[in-house]
Image: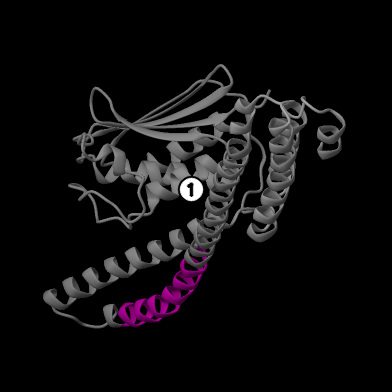
């Protein structure tokens, strides 16, 4: 461009603009260090500006064109400034993402370690309590042992679900296979309906096969049914429904309990958050969270809402085509 400016007296403006445009395009592909960038900008501005000033002094170039001499490098430098700001922001985002990934890895490791660490003392304590329960105890002592056993059962469930959550978060925990979802729900309903203190309703329409890990889906539905049992009074109704809508298979677990407060709906799937069940023991705060993680891992969804008679949890999974 400098050569064209020398060879075309009076037409320097065109090559002058193209020169700065070329530098801007080149800088867009690769961010240069600050020193060489400023040096290159000053050099081309000084050479081209000197040529334009000489041509203007000889009357071959309108003096109004001289305003371009400081303007074009300023525009270029502003563009460079924005490009470097963007580069800095991208680097900061990468650093933040790296820290977040590291934190997630530490959380998964904590879940695994905590789960394994809890199991051993719980097993030992349970064994001693079972031995103690076989002896002659008064009523107060038996009640104390029963409470302790209940809390150990809760800790054992917490340990198992911590490990399950860690496996899900780490990925690769699913072993999918073609599964008749309606048949799985019917079997689940048969197992749970052995409890005579609730009224069980199972309604399954054909769903066809879904590609899921049946063990994980069964754990998910067990968590939903367990939640329904805890929030349904004796004699209450728990309904299991399944069917197919377009390309989705849907399983709903509904109960006749008090429902979910509007303020609690956004939090029901949060980890370690739980409501006080009026008709069952305090949960671990991981059952519903684990259930949603399983749904997401299968490419599905798990939602909660209030139905006409109580809470309704809906599990949606992609159907096999």
Q: Which residue is located at x 33 percent, y 56 percent?
A: 272
Magenta segment, prevailing SS (helix, strand or loop): helix
Disc 1 target residue: 219
The answer to whether residue 239 is left or right of residue 181 is left
Is 113 inside the magenta-drawn segment? yes
> Can you give x and y, in whole percent of width and height, for residue 215 in the image?
57, 48
Q: Which image quarter: residue 306?
A: top left
Q: Which residue is located at x 35 percent, y 67 percent?
A: 155
The answer to whether residue 238 is left or right of residue 74 is left
On the question of residue 319 being in view, the answer is: no
> Can you give x and y, in whole percent of width and height, for residue 301 in the image?
48, 34
Nearer the observer, 45 or 28: 45
> Can you give x and y, in whole percent of width and height, for residue 72 in the image?
62, 36
Element under disc 1: helix
> Can you give x and y, in whole percent of width and height, for residue 74 in the image?
57, 41
The answer to whether residue 53 is left or right of residue 100 is right
Nearer the observer, 286 or 24: 24
What range of the chain is rendered magenta? 108-131
């Amino acid at each position: 461009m400098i050569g064209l400016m020398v060879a075309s007296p009076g037409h320097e403006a065109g090559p002058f603009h193209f020169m700065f445009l070329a530098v801007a395009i080149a800088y867009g592909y690769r961010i240069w260090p600050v020193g060489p960038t400023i040096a290159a900008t000053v050099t081309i501005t000084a050479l081209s500006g000197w040529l334009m000033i000489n041509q203007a002094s000889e009357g071959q170039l309108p003096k109004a064109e001289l305003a371009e001499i400081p303007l074009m490098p300023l525009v270029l430098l502003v563009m460079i400034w924005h490009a470097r700001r963007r580069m800095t922001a991208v680097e900061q985002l990468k650093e933040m993402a790296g820290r977040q990934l590291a934190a997630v890895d530490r959380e998964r490791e904590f879940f695994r370690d905590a789960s394994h660490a809890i199991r051993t003392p719980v097993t030992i304590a349970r064994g001693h309590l079972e031995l103690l329960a076989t002896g002659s105890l008064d009523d107060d002592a038996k009640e104390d042992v029963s409470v302790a056993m209940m809390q150990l059962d809760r800790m054992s469930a917490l340990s198992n679900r911590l490990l399950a959550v860690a496996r899900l978060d780490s990925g690769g925990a699913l072993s999918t296979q073609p599964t008749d979802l309606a048949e799985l729900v019917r079997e689940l309903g048969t197992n749970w309906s052995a409890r005579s203190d609730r009224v069980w309703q199972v309604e399954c329409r054909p769903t066809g096969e879904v590609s899921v890990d049946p063990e994980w889906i069964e754990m998910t539905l067990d968590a939903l049914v367990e939640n329904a049992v805890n929030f349904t009074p004796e004699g209450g109704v728990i309904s299991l429904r399944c069917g197919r809508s377009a390309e989705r298979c849907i399983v709903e677990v509904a109960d006749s309990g008090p429902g979910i407060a509007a303020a609690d709906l956004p939090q029901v799937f949060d980890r370690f958050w739980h409501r006080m069940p009026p008709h069952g023991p305090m949960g671990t705060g991981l059952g519903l969270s684990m259930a949603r993680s399983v749904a997401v891992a299968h490419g599905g969804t798990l939602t909660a809402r209030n139905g006409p008679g109580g809470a309704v949890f809906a599990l949606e999974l992609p159907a096999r085509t």
